[in-house]
Image: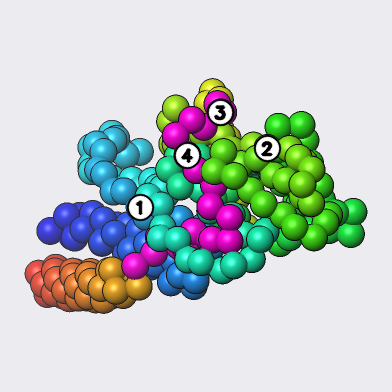
Amino acid sequence: MYIQNRLGLVESTETMLAQSRRLEQITNNLANVDTAGYKKEDITFWEMLYSTDHQDSRVGKAIHNVTDMRPGVFEETANPLDFAIGGNGFFKVQTPAGVRYTRAGQFMANNEGQLITPNGDLVLGDGGPLLVNGENISVTDDGNITVDGQQRGILAVVTFANLADLEKQGQNLFALTGEGQEEPALTFSVKQGYLEKSNVSTMTELTAMIDLNRAYETQQRIIRTMDDMDDKAISRVGRLNS
């Protein structure tokens, strides 16, 4: 009984750790509910059979982070440097760590007149950084930027055969991992003066948080019950030995 209880304690602890990790994600999702272009995070759970140091087999719990890439709704801002992508695609930006991708089109101009993200990263076009210094800025559906009647370039909007090749890097950016490759997006339209809102549903996340708290409390009760069973077993063994 004691050995079985110890295994139960390990599995309950693993479950509580996974639930804590999921709770951190929910908290982060809620904190970014108003962040333009933010994609909610989730976790998938599965179980696997493996051998312990004593060559005994047991079921272990594994977790994997996933990102919900579904688009958010558009919000009109009337800011000429706010862009939203309708359909598939990501803006391409140059960061100190290399090229990154984002759906957050809340851009601005730096002192040199270049289009940048709020973090200062250069937004890339078909020929590199884009100059937007001028009075009248207009962007067509295909990302063609015109400033004061002069063409300044086309926004680089790219997509990927498998979105699972993208990994969150923070600051609303994604990095390409593995053997994935970018390719020009074909089915998209750029909406000037709009931003894509976060795809986080506050009600859904709050409901998930309540369910997680209940599940966590259940695991705590299980651990307390197993501790009580161990105490009783040890007490009985002590009486038999005496």
The residue that disc 3 covers is 184
The residue that disc 2 covers is 154
- Label 2 CA crowd tier, 10 Å (few <14, some 14–19, many 20+): some
Amino acid type, residue under disc 3 in the picture: Pro
Could you tell me how far apart the alpha carbons at marks 2 and 1 are, in whole angstroms?
37 Å
| Residue placed most toward the observer, 33 or 225 | 33
Of the image marks 1 and 4, the number of the one nearer the N terminus: 1
* Residue 96 rendering spot, x and y as whole percentages: 78, 45
Span highlighted in magenta in the image: 182-201
Could you tell me how far apart the alpha carbons at marks 1 and 4 are, in whole angstroms?
29 Å
* Residue 43 rendering spot, x and y as whole percentages: 35, 52
Could you tell me how far apart the alpha carbons at marks 3 and 2 are, in whole angstroms?
12 Å
Could you tell me how far apart the alpha carbons at marks 3 and 1 are, in whole angstroms?
30 Å
- Label 1 CA crowd tier, 10 Å (few <14, some 14–19, many 20+): some
The residue that disc 4 covers is 188
Q: Nearer the observer, disc 3 or disc 1? A: 3
Q: Nearer the observer, disc 3 or disc 2? A: 2
The residue that disc 1 covers is 43
Of the image marks 3 and 2, the number of the one nearer the N terminus: 2
* Residue 1 rendering spot, x and y as whole percentages: 12, 58
| Residue placed most toward the observer, 78 or 130 | 78
Of the image marks 2 and 1, the number of the one nearer the N terminus: 1
